[in-house]
Image: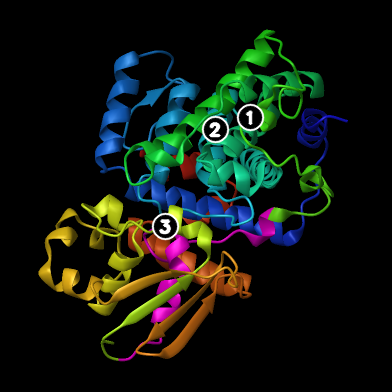
Amino acid sequence: MTIAALLSAFATAPMTPSDRAARMIRLSCLDWAACALAGRGEPLAGVLRGVALGEGGRAEAGLFGGGRGPARAAALVNGAISHALDYDDTHFAHIGHPSVAVFPAALAVAEREGHGMGAMLEAALLGVEASIRCGLWLGRGHYQVGYHQTATAGAFGATLAAARLCGLSAEETGHALGLAATKAAGLKAQFGTMGKPLNAGLAAECGVMAADWARAGLRSNPGALEGENGFGATHHGADARGAFDGLGETWAFETISHKFHACCHGLHGTLEAMRGIEGTPGQLVIHTHPRWLSVCNIPMPKDGLEAKFSYRMVAAMALAGIDTGEIGSFSDDLAQRADLAALMARVEVVSDDHLSEMQARVLADGVELSHDLAAPMTLETRAARLSAKAEALTGQGAALEAAIAAEDLGAFRAQVFGG
């Protein structure tokens, strides 16, 4: 059976998610919406929203920040805006951000097709699960060579979410996946620029367009994911077919990680470890997994965006008492501060292949501190931290939580789009 056939069967069958996965998708919905609302004022948001509104078209779905547009355009704009602050959830096995690619597609199509919140959440859960499995299938080689899994694997998850809400058959869903395979794209070269959040929007848009094309009768090669000259073969995929074992029975999404620092997730283990530092050390040596050195190790960031991808800068910020959980902390003037430059000079970043991608080890004047992001966190603790984060970011966290808990899409839309 092809990967497209496996995923199509998953997307069209009745869903029986685990209790933890069902609760986690609601927490990620809250987190995604809060990140998007907080990102409405970013320069990227104004540019993309303006372009979308300038194009016109049917007012099918809301745009973060105001206005309505076609579902395709809404998915693009909302996906990019919700990733603009790089504060959304991450799955380390997937090597990407599942929610920002899938939720925008699911919400836009749910609005257009007249579905309720329950159907939207169900489609989003199947989409994020599929994108995680596709990320595993593509593997580390795909990411290391320069592809951004949020955009590539995310496009397949967004396609399945849109296909389910559009009521596509398994055959049509297979064609949609084949069409997505010829459109999905996204490069790590965009990290530290507006192009990185755009990658998330492109994945969401791809999902809506592929589902719409398949429903309209466009046909493709369903083997375009893993076949000869297919996506995996041409994009340095690992062809790890075991990535889809237990699909629909076990839920990789249960191990999603949420951000509590407003920067690249690769920096979070270090920042959590540094919470144990007392005083200001003369030397700080950060040990991290080798993969992160090509992702978030900009040695001399030039602005706030690049600061979110710099071990040395976030370490200096933490030592200076700057709150890395506060969005406004990552301002462009960080690079001009002499005190931070002096602290950055004390920081050394070391590759350590004995650590997992979720672990960090910090030596502060020889005193060792460590943290593992994979350490268990109860749902109650996670919910409390995300509730506080949503309220701090938006001032309307409680209202968002209530709408999600009640599965009231109208109330949810009123909170995220106004009116």
Residue 116: tell me if it is visible.
no
Instruction: Tell me if mark 3 has few (under 14), some (14-19) or many (20+) residues whose alpha carbon lies within 10 angstroms of its own.
Output: many
Q: Position of residue 227 (x, y in %)?
A: 76, 25
Residue 83's quadrant in the figure? top left
Closer to the camera in the image, 5 or 307 = 307
Residue type (three-letter) at the residue carrying disc 2: Ala
Q: Assess whether mark 1 and mark 3 are in contact (beta carbons under 8 angstroms).
A: no
User: Which comes before the other along the chain, label 2 or label 3?
Assistant: 2
Q: Position of residue 231 (x, y in %)?
A: 66, 28
Q: Position of residue 137 (x, y in %)?
A: 71, 43
Q: Name the residue carrying label 2.
A: 105
Closer to the camera in the image, 148 or 32 = 148
Q: Name the residue carrying label 1.
A: 159
Residue 81: tell me if it is visible.
yes
Q: Name the residue carrying label 3.
A: 264
Q: Decide whether residue 273 is among the magenta residues.
A: yes
Residue 191's quadrant in the figure? top left
Q: CA distance from mark 2 to mark 3?
A: 23 Å
Marking on residue 419: none
Closer to the camera in the image, 55 or 193 = 193
Q: Assess whether mark 3 and mark 2 are in contact (beta carbons under 8 angstroms).
A: no
Q: Decide whether residue 385 is among the magenta residues.
A: no
Q: Assess whether mark 2 and mark 1 are in contact (beta carbons under 8 angstroms).
A: yes
Please report the bounds of the magenta region as a residue range: 253-278
Residue type (three-letter) at the residue carrying disc 1: Thr
Q: Position of residue 211 (x, y in %)?
A: 64, 21
User: Which comes before the other along the chain, label 1 or label 2?
Assistant: 2
Instruction: Tell me if mark 1 has few (under 14), some (14-19) or many (20+) residues whose alpha carbon lies within 10 angstroms of its own.
Output: many
Q: Secondary structure at mark 2?
A: helix
Colour scheme shown:
rainbow
Residue 198's quadrant in the figure? top left
Closer to the camera in the image, 240 or 121 = 240
